[in-house]
Amino acid sequence: MNIDNLDGILRLDNEKMFEMVYTWPKLIELIMAESISIPSQIDIGKYHLNYKNTFSQVMITGMGGSAISGDYTRTYFENSAELPIFVQRNYTLPKFVNETTLIIIVSYSGNTEESISGLMSAIESGCPTICIGSGGKLEEFCLKNELPFFKIPSGYQPRASFPLLFFPIIKILDSINITTLKSSEIQEVILQLKTMRETIKPEILIAENQAKQIALKLHNKIPVIWSPFLCVANRFKCQINENSKQLALAEELPEFNHNHIVGFEDLALDHNFIVIAFRFPSEIPNVSLRFEITKEIIGKKVKIVDIVIKEGNLLSQLITSTYLGDYISMYLALLNNQNPSTVDSIDYLKSQMEKRGNTQSTLMKKLDSLS
């Protein structure tokens, strides 16, 4: 379709994904105005959770867009946090978690079965636990057992609600003095998002719209996404998968110089790949040099498109690059004649898991049995 046709966009985007993503600055402001009460300790059945312990590590657990918010947290605080931050994408937690591990369970719906299972594992391991979600079983259980719950607005597509999943995490870590959050950095993010969206929103025509231009380059291609921050590449990959219904690959530099680069050596000339390279002012000089040498090696084999983030603190660089990637994926969905909101394969898989194994309902009953 013609991605400059506003009526066509509205018809295909009938669940208002563009409208949701447009509100990111407002969502950040909303979250930063909220607070969460952390108890000293609670008992859930026979399990004791002590929130006054000296924490030795943080583990963020979730799936999909919820888990990606943990990846961004780990990346943002990599050079400043005194404690290790882990991200877990599974039904269970590693054996090493204990009463000094802060667990943050993230599930937009509050009903993600892996998250519910992770909550059970956290309680059984005696881990102080905080949940983030819009409602569902997580909220019900937390309210019943006085477990800390950071409630976020409902009614959004989970992957369109990235600020609602990421900013509560960094706000929680700041409130319990694990990390330090600078209000000036948050304000810079909000300002830069507001500025960026005025240049990439649907009303801006292709000739002046970077997101539309890149989407056109990705149409009918298989994007290979490079970034010195894997969270950015992986988020963009997932948005292309879910919004655009299109395959994509994500790679992190310098790691891909030790494997991925060799895969281009025998690439056929009639291939369907295109490389998208995210570049940041915060990338270290050796990484910048690796980008340039890698381009020399494979530039004759595949088209390379740079997405250059020119300014901002690290948090702003991470969020604005993600914002641009989301808009690109939505325009790409339209080019593919796809509604960016639907995820039929995921919906079918979830329904079959429950139909064939009663997976979600069984986990919910087990969770209730803990208290």
Image (tube, helix red, strand yellow):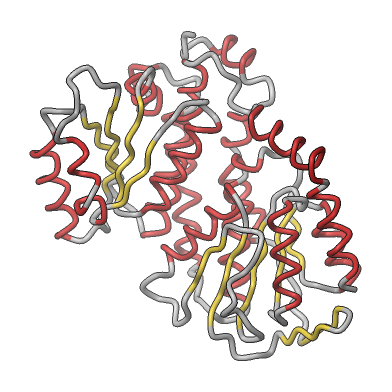
From the top left corner, tell me how far across and down residue 148 is, in percent. 77, 71
From the top left corner, tell me how far across and down residue 257 is, in percent. 19, 51
Residue depicted at x 20% and y 27% = 303
The count of marks equals: 0
Horizontal side of 272 relative to 196 (left or right) equals left
Q: In terms of depth relative to the viewer, which is nearer, 61 or 146? A: 61
Quarter that holds the C terminus:
bottom right
Residue depicted at x 37% and y 59% = 314
From the top left corner, tell me how far across and down residue 221 is, in percent. 35, 22
Single out the residue that lies furthest toward the front.
Answer: 356
Residue depicted at x 54% and y 55% = 69
Residue depicted at x 65% and y 65% = 92
Q: In this view, does 185 lie above or below 29?
A: below
Q: In terms of depth relative to the viewer, which is nearer, 363 or 254? A: 363
Q: In terms of depth relative to the viewer, which is nearer, 356 or 308? A: 356
Horizontal side of 67 relative to 301 (left or right) equals right
Rendered image quadrant of residue 55: bottom right
Rendered image quadrant of residue 176: bottom right
Q: In this view, does 239 lie above or below 287?
A: above
From the top left corner, tell me how far across and down residue 200 is, in percent. 44, 29
Q: In terms of depth relative to the viewer, which is nearer, 58 or 181? A: 58
